[in-house]
């Protein structure tokens, strides 16, 4: 059964205070009913005395208006005056509003902290949290900001280190190429050229992966359908079997990161599956793009392993035709930068399905 209110700290605080208010007012109402009750009725005249024998009594003035009564447990209880009900409702409304505002003030810093934690995985360079609220909320925001700064510095330091190593390796690699050209053994020279070409590809892929990981591209509105049509047309002109179905409305995203993700998925499908079938589905919640091939697929227990850098599956991917094991890692990193998720699934009729889901937030 769907909840009437979401299970949040705000809802719990508000309902707790509201319950305390209702219970206190109910107890007050019960006590006031006891005060207004007529528990002891005055005895009436005896039933066997006739009107003629009864003593003469002076005429009394007309009885003033008395409030209506109700019977509760055999007692006649007078109902409180209208002013009592007006005051009771006014107090209930005022205290409920105060409870709502108080619960909102207490829950707001926690909500901001949760939102910032969710955004941290997408953008390490997001602005720090404003340190406002209670002492505990300010302390939590301060600790979170320091953690974000340390993570960003560690990632930047690692990126600079790996980029420097990859860049410096180009110099000895160039010297090796020049010396190989002077070799007399053609077979050995060709093998060394292949090894050096593979090393150069690994260096280029590593630098590209590090640049993508440190990307801080701005968010823009993008026509995703036009992008996919352009990519499919380019691959078709190059002689590849690519088809596109479906359409999507413009999406707020990071254009370069999205293009990089889709390009890696498309190249992966063409390299290992000989074709690419792109299917687009769009709704109010988000956009889904599936790239399907007709390759050998991936073992179920390796679905997450292939997203790790430099991981290749020898039993399903031919090393002679593949890259260096960074394509899917770059694609998932780019998808994360766009606020989306990337997953893999083996099709029931064969082949691999790469599914990219982008939220419309």
Image (spheres, helix red, strand yellow):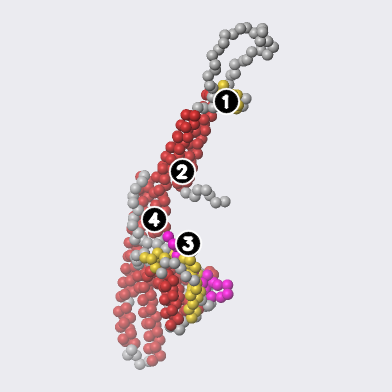
Secondary structure at numbered mark 4: helix
| Pointers 1 and 4 in contact (C-beta within 8 Å) | no
Figure quadrant of residue 327: bottom left
Density class for disc 4 (Cα within 10 Å; few <14, some 14-19, many ≥20) is many
Q: CA distance from mark 1 to mark 2?
A: 39 Å
What residue is disc 1 on? 69
Residue named by callout 3: 284
Residue where numbered disc 4 is placed: 116
Viewer-proximal residue, 45 or 285? Answer: 45
Q: Position of residue 271 (x, y in %)?
A: 47, 79
Instruction: State the SS at label 2.
Output: helix
Residue under the image location 41 percent in, 42 percent down: 102
Residue 313 visible within the image = no
Q: Quadrant of the C terminus?
A: bottom left
Residues rendered magenta in the picture: 345-361
Residue 13 is labelled as 2
């Amino acid at each position: 059964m769907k909840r009437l209110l979401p299970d949040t700290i705000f809802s719990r605080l508000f309902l707790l205070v509201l319950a305390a208010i209702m219970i206190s007012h109910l107890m007050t109402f019960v006590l006031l009913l006891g005060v207004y009750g007529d528990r002891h009725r005055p005895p009436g005249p005896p039933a066997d005395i006739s009107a003629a024998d009864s003593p003469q009594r002076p005429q009394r003035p007309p009885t003033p208006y008395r409030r209506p009564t109700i019977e509760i447990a055999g007692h006649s209880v007078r109902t409180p005056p209208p002013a009592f009900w007006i005051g009771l409702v006014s107090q209930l409304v005022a205290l409920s509003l105060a409870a709502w505002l108080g619960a909102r003030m207490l829950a707001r810093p926690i909500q901001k902290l949760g939102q910032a934690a969710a955004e941290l995985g997408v953008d390490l360079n997001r602005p720090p949290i404003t340190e406002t609220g209670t002492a505990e909320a300010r302390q939590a925001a301060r600790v979170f900001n320091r953690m974000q700064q340390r993570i960003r510095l560690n990632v930047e330091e690692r990126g600079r280190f790996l980029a420097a190593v990859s860049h410096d390796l180009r110099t000895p690699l160039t010297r090796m190429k020049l010396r190989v050209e002077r070799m007399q053994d053609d077979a050995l020279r060709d093998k060394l050229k292949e090894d050096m070409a593979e090393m150069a590809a690994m260096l280029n892929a590593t630098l590209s992966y590090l640049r993508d990981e440190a990307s801080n591209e701005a968010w823009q509105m993008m026509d995703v359908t036009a992008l996919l049509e352009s990519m499919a047309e380019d691959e078709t002109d190059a002689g590849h079997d690519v088809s596109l179905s479906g359409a999507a409305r413009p999406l707020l995203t990071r254009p370069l990161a999205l293009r990089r993700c889709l390009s890696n998925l498309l190249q992966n499908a063409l390299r290992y599956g000989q074709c690419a079938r792109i299917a687009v589905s769009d709704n109010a919640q988000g956009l889904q793009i599936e790239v399907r091939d007709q390759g050998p697929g991936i073992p179920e227990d390796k679905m997450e392993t292939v997203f790790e850098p430099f991981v290749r599956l020898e039993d399903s991917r031919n090393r002679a035709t593949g890259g260096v094991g960074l394509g899917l890692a770059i694609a998932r990193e780019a998808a994360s930068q766009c606020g989306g998720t990337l997953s893999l699934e083996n099709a029931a009729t064969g082949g691999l399905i790469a599914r990219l889901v982008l939220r419309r937030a």
